[in-house]
Image: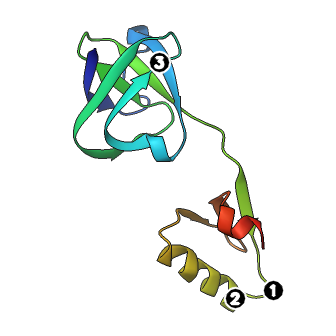
């Protein structure tokens, strides 16, 4: 199996080295070691020294010199708004307590769809 030991940041790698792409959701984009399969069927092992958050457009550098481009998968989101900022801060605290990645917006919070909050 091919191995990949390095990530090249989006915009820094030569597009002529692109062999394929891999579409990953948020959880699968924050790994140190994971077996992946690119869109063209190429299987490879991502084997980094430390966990790293992969971003859309980053390049996974294969040991052969080629690049597999990271594509961020579309995911359902929830926008949370409250009657006032005090309530919004309280909700943000609870989300942080659950370690849920949260986008802080001027008058709302945005998170990935969550099975606990979806039923509220």
Which of disc 3 and disc 1 is earlier in sequence? 3
Image quadrant where residue 5 sits: top left
Q: Position of residue 56 (x, y in %)?
A: 51, 35
Q: Are marks 2 and 1 in contact (CB under 8 Å)?
A: yes
Q: Quadrant of the C terminus?
A: bottom right
Residue 3 sits in quarter: top left
Q: Secondary structure at mark 3?
A: loop
Task: Measuring from the top left, give residue 76's x and y in whole percent.
Answer: 71, 49
Residue at (68%, 57%) from the top-left corner?
113
State the CA–CA distance, disc 2 to disc 1: 7 Å
The tag on residue 83 is 1
Q: Is residue 65 visible?
A: yes
- Numbered label attached to residue 64: none
Inter-mark Cα distance, 3 to 2: 43 Å
Q: CA distance from mark 1 to mark 3?
A: 45 Å
Quadrant of the image containing the N terminus: top left
Q: Earlier in the sequence, mark 3 or mark 2?
A: 3
Residue beneath label 2, please? Answer: 87
| Dot 2: element | helix
**Which structural element holds mark 1?**
loop
Asked if the residues shown at circle 3 and circle 2 are in contact, with their CB atoms under 8 angstroms apart, the answer is no
């Amino acid at each position: 199996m091919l191995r990949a030991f390095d990530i090249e940041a989006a915009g820094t790698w030569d597009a002529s080295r692109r062999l394929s792409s891999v579409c990953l959701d948020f959880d699968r984009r924050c790994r140190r070691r994971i077996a992946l399969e690119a869109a063209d069927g190429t299987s490879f092992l991502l084997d980094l020294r430390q966990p790293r958050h992969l971003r859309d457009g980053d390049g996974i550098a294969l040991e052969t010199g080629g690049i597999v481009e990271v594509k961020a998968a579309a995911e359902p989101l929830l926008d949370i708004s409250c009657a006032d900022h005090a309530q919004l801060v309280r909700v943000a605290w609870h989300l942080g307590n659950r370690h849920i990645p949260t986008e802080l917006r001027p008058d709302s919070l945005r998170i990935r769809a969550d099975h606990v909050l979806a039923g509220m």
